[in-house]
Amino acid sequence: MPKLPMCALALAMLAAGANAQPPGASSEEDALALLRQAQAYLKANGLAKATAEFNRLDSPFNSRSAINPHGDLYLYSVAPDGFQAVHGKNPKIRGKVMIEMRDADGFYLIREFVRLCFHTKEGKGWVPYKWPHPITKQVEPKRGYVERVPELPELCLGTGIYR
């Protein structure tokens, strides 16, 4: 292997890892695939059954499984007023209006989810914030993805990846 100057090696490592996920972490593609499967499950099974499934801590949507291979993804929902019927990791959030929820830096993440879901033509998008990792329990940078449910215009589903 040729010897590289230390600064060239450092730059190469930075460039390679700039958009890379940490080892064993879900990617944007993993998150989007999980959301597609959640949307399909909701359409096939209806809101009541899907809500119960999406709220189960041991659901394949919220724990290590074929559709969540790293176990670091989970589902949540948001309504136009910030009500969260679904949270796959924190039962204390379920059934509450969380519009005032802030991240570790004071960022109003639910407000931003609501804006993207209900006040943009696309009805979906990514939101950067800081949140406790479900496995490490450490506050880490996260990118949450939310998208409106086509058949239920007052509901958005979301998940997110840690960076």
Image (cartoon, helix red, strand yellow):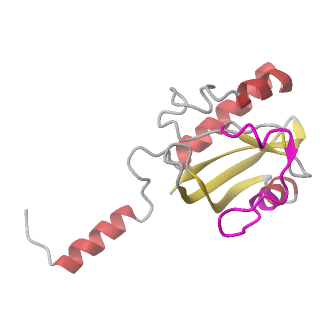
Give the residue drawn at x 73%, y 30%. Answer: 55
Give the residue drawn at x 66%, y 38%. Answer: 89
Residue 102 covered by magenta stretch: yes
Q: Position of residue 16 (x, y in %)?
A: 34, 63
**In what quadrant of the picture does the N terminus appear?**
bottom left
Looking at the rendering, which quadrant does residue 54 occupy? top right
Give the residue drawn at x 42%, y 65%. Answer: 18
Q: Is residue 144 above or below residue 150?
A: below
Q: Is residue 135 above or below residue 56?
A: below
Q: Position of residue 106 (x, y in %)?
A: 72, 69
Instruction: Identify the magenta region.
Output: 89-112
Q: Is residue 146 left or right of residue 129?
A: right
Q: Is residue 109 left or right of residue 135?
A: right
Q: Nearer the viewer, residue 113 or 83?
A: 83
Q: Examine the residues drawn in magenta and state their main secondary structure.
A: loop
Give the residue drawn at x 35%, y 68%. Answer: 15
Q: Nearer the viewer, residue 135 or 61?
A: 135
Q: Position of residue 46 (x, y in %)?
A: 83, 23
Q: Is residue 155 above or below residue 140?
A: above
Q: Is residue 156 left or right of residue 81?
A: left
Q: Position of residue 66 (x, y in %)?
A: 51, 26
Number of numbered discs overlaid on the protein picture: 0
